[in-house]
Amino acid sequence: MCLGKGLIVRQRSLIAITAALAAGALTLTACGSRDSGDKGSDSGNGDGTTVVIGVDAPLTGDLSAMGLGIKNSADLAVRNANKKEFVKGVTFKIEALDDQAQPSAGQQNASKFVSEQEVLGVVGPLNSSVAESMQKVFDDNKLVEVSPANTGPALTQGADWQKKKVRPYKSYFRTSTTDAIQGPFAAQYVYNTAKKKKVFVIDDKKTYGSGLAATFTEEFKKLGGKVVGTEHINPDAKDFSAVATKVKNSGAEVVYYGGEYPQAGPLSKQIKAAGAKIPLVGGDGIKDDTFMKLAGAEATGDLATSVGAPVEDLPSAKQFVADYKAAGYKEEYSAYGGYAYDSAWAIIEAVKKVVDANGGKLPTDARAKVTEAMQSVSFDGVTGKVSFDEYGDATNKQLTVYAVKNGAWVPVKSGTYTG
């Protein structure tokens, strides 16, 4: 039975209902609850509004370490916004959906988010290939999406971004920098600092991996380096012995891998087991502690680039690190925690702009207004200054090179790509 607002129950009926409840023959639910399928906009206190921030990430599977860090960090942003009453009259909640790092699941999640009127923004996804499947769904419904991790340049600058930049979707933003910068940054470090002149390039054929490998290769050749071999691997594979043999026979001084840690770890281990005692270098997709567990003791010296500066070293991130620990999350915030917090906070900032401009209330076209407001959002975040350029890309383009030392990722160089 549903007792709605303003329902008047006569005394005799109330006695009957009470008896039925005591006997377990009747259950009361609030009208407009999540269980009823009506999301509504009432926060439950009668005088407020609930705004839901969706989170899309791989919450299960091989990449769940990163995905859960994204979810928890977005949750922390919402907790802090509510605690501070950052937007008067608005209570924020998150709804996290698992995309399993699969584009098809991401598209289904996007459709679910747009069907729920309380959802005014989405944090995620982790994978660029998943983002490709979600962008049009969100854009058609004017629902803003802010990714903490996507690095594929085409997402913001169009498929022909190397020739002419054209923004395909105005509802898409990201707080991480792109592979157009990350790949060349890695190439400059490998060639100029690590003094490696011959590279074997491998990718997993996915949007992120192949794009990253391509931008690395272009810059490495431009610097004077030589690509002595290339290979594509199946992202579901675990046996890379054939590739490892090719690497050994190529005379490569370093391997560059475009892909993620579930494959990068075993690949590094098998290359060294084949006799090629050379470092494996990858992007932010391999920079997770799970990499070392998969790669083993000989991972020492392997390298990874990642967006921004190390969160632990940023004065702006001290409160985030302390709050995350105090919140008691089971999982680490991982590589994208700070960026996920900033992505969620960007949505919160945009909601505040819209509410303030509308006399303290959400307008009827809140989604479109929040998407529009995102373009001018600017604040000092966990990862530094957060704002967006005309393509929806982060204006903060700092990157860091990490090396595996004593079983941990240790920063060895921070800076920006100078092309």
Image: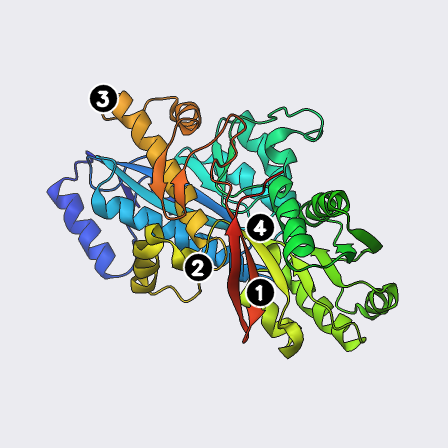
Q: Please determine whether, in this image, residue 286 is positioned above or below residue 11.
A: below
The residue indicated by pointer 4 is 99
**Label 1 vs 3, first from the N-terminus:** 3
**Label 2 vs 1, first from the N-terminus:** 2
Mark 1–mark 3 distance (CA, rounded to whole Å): 51 Å
The residue indicated by pointer 1 is 403
Q: Nearer the viewer, mark 2 or mark 1?
A: 1
Give the x, y percent position of residue 418: 59, 40
Give the SS element for disc 3. loop
> Label 4 is placed on what type of residue?
Asp
Which residue is at 83% across, 65% downward?
Answer: 247
Give the SS element for disc 2. loop
Residues under numbered marks 1 and 3 in contact, where contact means CB atoms less than 8 Å apart: no
Q: Please determine whether, in this image, residue 67 is positioned above or below residue 331.
A: above
Mark 4–mark 1 distance (CA, rounded to whole Å): 30 Å
> Label 2 is placed on what type of residue?
Tyr
Quarter assignment of residue 20? bottom left
Residues under numbered marks 3 and 2 in contact, where contact means CB atoms less than 8 Å apart: no
